[in-house]
Image (cartoon, rainbow, N blue to C red):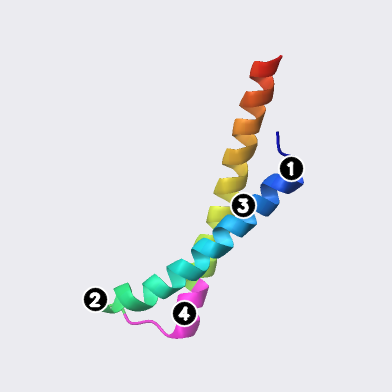
Amino acid sequence: MQTRLQSLIEAWANTLIGYVINLLVQLVVYPFYGATFTFGQNIQIGLIFMVVSIARSYILRRGFNWLHSRNEQ
C-alpha cells in the first residue's frame, strides 16, 4: 500500500508527463478547430487541467488504497 506522499508523488509525475504531451497536442489540434491561442494561453489552459488531474489522480489512488486496506481487515 502507498503512503499519502507516495500517492501524491505518483499523481504529480503522471500528470506532469501528461501535461507535456497535452501541451504539444493542443498546439497541433486547436488550429484544426479554428481556435487560436498564444503559447502562453496554451500553457495556462494546460495548467488548469493539470491541477484538476492531480487532484483526481490523488483522490482516486487514496480511495483505492482505503478500499484495499478495508478489505484486508
61 or 45: nearer the viewer: 61
Question: How far apart are labels 2 and 3 at the CA level?
Answer: 31 Å
Magenta residues (range): 36-44
Q: Tell me which label, 4 or 1, sits earlier in the chain.
A: 1
Residue 39 among those drawn in magenta = yes
Query: What residue is rendered at 52% in x and 74% in y?
Result: 44
Question: Seen from this angle, which residue lies furthest front?
Answer: 1
- Judged from the image, the secondary structure of the residue bearing numbered disc 2 is helix
Q: Which mark is residue 4?
A: 1
Q: Tell me which label, 2 or 3, sits earlier in the chain.
A: 3
Q: Tell me which label, 4 or 3, sits earlier in the chain.
A: 3
| Residue type at tag 3 | Ala
Query: What residue is rendered at 47% in x and 79% in y?
Result: 41
| Residue type at tag 1 | Arg
Q: Tell me which label, 2 or 4, sits earlier in the chain.
A: 2
Q: Which residue is mark 2?
A: 32
Q: Which mark is residue 28?
A: none
Residue 46 rendering spot, x and y as whole percentages: 49, 69
Q: Which residue is mark 3?
A: 11
Which corner quadrant holds the N terminus?
Answer: top right
Residue 55 seen: yes
User: On the picture, is 6 further left or further right than 45?
Assistant: right
Question: How far apart are labels 4 and 1 at the CA level?
Answer: 32 Å
Of tags 2 and 4, the one toward the viewer is 2
> Looking at the image, is 69 positioned above or below residue 56?
above
Q: Which residue is mark 4?
A: 41
Residue 40 rendering spot, x and y as whole percentages: 50, 83
